[in-house]
Image (cartoon, grey):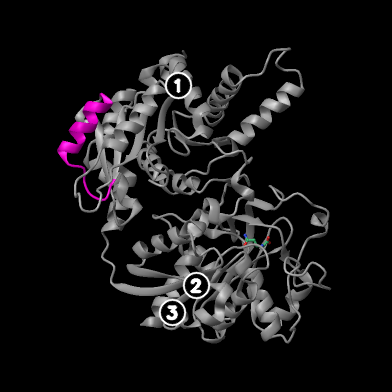
């Protein structure tokens, strides 16, 4: 074991009974308390065989989150960043697909010196190596490791076994296990039931892992009787069984844990100090603000069946709720049926067309954008929402009825949204887009004013946002849209690509779009300027 002072500490979060209980939020909420004083580095282990979630349909797996370094990761990284602050790096996301890929590469290279390559020790060793290398590379004081899936899932067994072995290596005093489970209250029984938790803890123990803490997700506070029972079966102290009751905001979970002395117990177990709670205090002040306004904002896309598909967009609106004292009701608008759903847009205060791919539902999105433009409803277009705003404007204002994107019609002559020359020959889908952090320079206008107001611009007018797209605005249509009032108000530094557009203020109160994904960087304590601007404009119109 390393010298004690340099020893990285490990907090492992596993899930039991069901998926979707909020392991990511639980991990991030614990991490928040240590993020002031320690370099706490989240890591997610996912059992699926994809290299990364980049090629997965959002309906299947929720939003694909993008890091500064351009790596596509699980949406839980959104929670980590919103709670802990820092951008993660590629190494912090590990899928079984990448583990196996590396094992295969090593085997072909003869690295195993004629040995039979096995799940144990070769795969489990590689997983431990990856975890420890990430700790070293990021200089982590604390590694906060979330094991995806539910205990008992075949696909996470190797991760669990690797962690069991890692505990032997680093010592029990340097590793702490938090197991999140579900406590149902069946209808008609009206009693908190602990059996599923007992069984899931047993499964963990059979695998050689003894949880230090059990967090019970439940529709209400766990009763003392429930805690006692779980403690007895899990062989832990009663105070180490925590409640995670349903709350009206995920930002209240850290406080809920704090009230139960959870983090102090973790600090004690890991022999680390909990010095201050600045961030919690900032959050609490915001969370306590009384919301006196009400708005209805439509999110218009084709993945509206699963709200997680647009998780960061939803979070960005929540950040505005607290910073602008407004209750926002989200109206999910399926653009595949614009005509049937159109009545849903009556009385709407703002419209967002978020990122998307492919040609399905596109004409509906263009109709929605036209509706926002003509009726002067505040509009925010994100990525595809910018590209389609340009197409709508060309078709309906600049008299170019054929305007389209290569993504919709790959044989189009002179498409308004096109592939750059160097992209023409890319055939693979995974990881081949313009991904990650890029800087853009803003010209004066609404967008620049907003970034200035929220102090997210440097003195040279440069801002930085993340990207995830393949197509770009064709430079040869810019003059035409600008002449008609749709201004390019920000370009990328490195290649002068269109990054931000806005309609002249004499024509529309707030019609703004960006090629980037500003939702990925919005924080409760610092909302994204473009969302802030949308809500501010909607409030102004309402008054
Ligand atoms: N489909 C568009 C592109 O690839 C936009 C992508 C997005 O909205 N994230 O360029």
| Dot label at residue 201 | none
Q: Position of residue 515 (x, y in %)?
A: 63, 63
Badge 2 density bin: few <14, some 14–19, many ≥20, Cα 10 Å: many
| Dot label at residue 164 | 1
| As drawn, 486 above or below 426 | below
Which quadrant of the picture is home to ligand 1? bottom right
| As drawn, 164 above or below 388 | above
The residue drawn where x is 71% and y is 58% is: 470
Q: Quadrant of residue 458?
A: bottom right
Q: Position of residue 127 (x, y in %)?
A: 56, 26
Residue 505 in view in this figure: no
Taking the magenta stretch, the answer to whether it contains residue 222 is yes
The residue drawn where x is 50% and y is 59% is: 310
Q: Secondary structure at mark 3?
A: loop
Q: Secondary structure at mark 2?
A: strand
In this rendered view, identify the residue nearer to me: 376 or 483: 376
Q: Quadrant of residue 503?
A: bottom right
Residue 464 in view in this figure: yes
| Dot label at residue 348 | 3
Bounds of the magenta segment: 218-235
Label 2 or label 3, whichever comes before in sequence order: 2
């Amino acid at each position: 074991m390393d010298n004690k002072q340099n020893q990285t500490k490990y907090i492992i979060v596993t899930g039991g009974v069901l998926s979707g209980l909020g392991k990511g939020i639980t991990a991030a909420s614990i991490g928040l308390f240590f993020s002031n004083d320690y370099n706490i580095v989240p890591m997610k282990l996912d059992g699926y065989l994809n290299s990364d979630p980049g090629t997965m349909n959002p309906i299947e797996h929720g939003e694909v989150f993008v890091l500064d370094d351009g790596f596509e990761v699980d949406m839980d990284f959104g929670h980590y960043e919103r709670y802990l602050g820092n951008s993660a790096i590629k190494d912090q996301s590990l899928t079984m697909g990448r583990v196996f890929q590396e094992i295969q590469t090593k085997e072909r290279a003869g690295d195993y010196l004629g040995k039979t390559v096995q799940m144990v020790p070769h795969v489990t060793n590689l997983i431990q190596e990856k975890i420890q290398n990430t700790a070293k590379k990021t200089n982590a004081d604390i590694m906060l490791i979330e094991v995806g899936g539910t205990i008992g899932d075949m696909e996470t067994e190797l991760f669990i076994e690797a962690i069991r072995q890692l505990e032997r290596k680093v010592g029990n005093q340097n590793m702490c296990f938090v197991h999140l489970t579900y406590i149902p209250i069946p209808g008609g029984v009206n009693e908190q039931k602990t059996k599923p938790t007992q069984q899931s803890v047993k499964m963990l123990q059979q695998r050689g892992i003894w949880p230090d803490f059990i967090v019970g997700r439940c529709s209400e506070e766990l009763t003392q009787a429930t805690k006692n029972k779980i403690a007895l079966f899990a062989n832990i102290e009663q105070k180490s069984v925590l409640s995670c009751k349903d709350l009206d905001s995920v930002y209240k979970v850290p406080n809920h844990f704090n009230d139960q002395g959870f983090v102090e117990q973790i600090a004690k177990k890991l022999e680390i100090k909990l010095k201050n709670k600045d961030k919690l205090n900032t959050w609490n002040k915001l969370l306590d603000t009384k919301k006196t306004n009400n708005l209805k904002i439509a999110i218009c896309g084709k993945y509206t069946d699963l709200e997680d598909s647009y998780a960061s967009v939803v979070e960005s609106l929540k950040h505005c709720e607290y910073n602008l004292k407004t209750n926002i009701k989200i109206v999910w608008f399926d653009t595949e049926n614009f005509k049937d759903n159109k009545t849903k847009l009556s009385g709407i205060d703002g419209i967002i067309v978020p990122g998307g791919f492919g040609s399905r539902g596109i004409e509906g999105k263009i109709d929605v954008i036209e509706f926002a433009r003509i009726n002067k409803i505040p509009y925010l277009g994100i990525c595809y929402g910018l590209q389609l705003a340009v197409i709508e404007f060309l078709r309906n204002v600049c008299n170019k009825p054929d305007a389209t994107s290569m993504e919709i019609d790959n044989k189009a002559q002179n498409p308004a949204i096109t592939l750059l020359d160097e992209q023409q020959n890319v055939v693979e889908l995974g990881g081949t887009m313009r991904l990650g952090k890029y800087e853009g320079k803003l010209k004066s206008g609404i967008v620049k004013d907003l970034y200035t107001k929220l102090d997210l611009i440097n003195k040279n007018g440069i801002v930085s946002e993340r990207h995830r797209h393949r197509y770009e605005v064709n430079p040869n249509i810019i003059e035409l849209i600008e002449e008609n009032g749709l201004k390019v108000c920000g370009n990328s530094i490195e290649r002068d690509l269109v990054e931000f557009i806005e309609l002249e203020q004499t024509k529309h109160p707030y019609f703004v779009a960006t090629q980037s994904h500003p939702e990925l960087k919005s924080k409760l304590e610092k909302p994204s300027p473009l969302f802030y601007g949308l809500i501010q404009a909607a409030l102004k119109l309402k008054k």
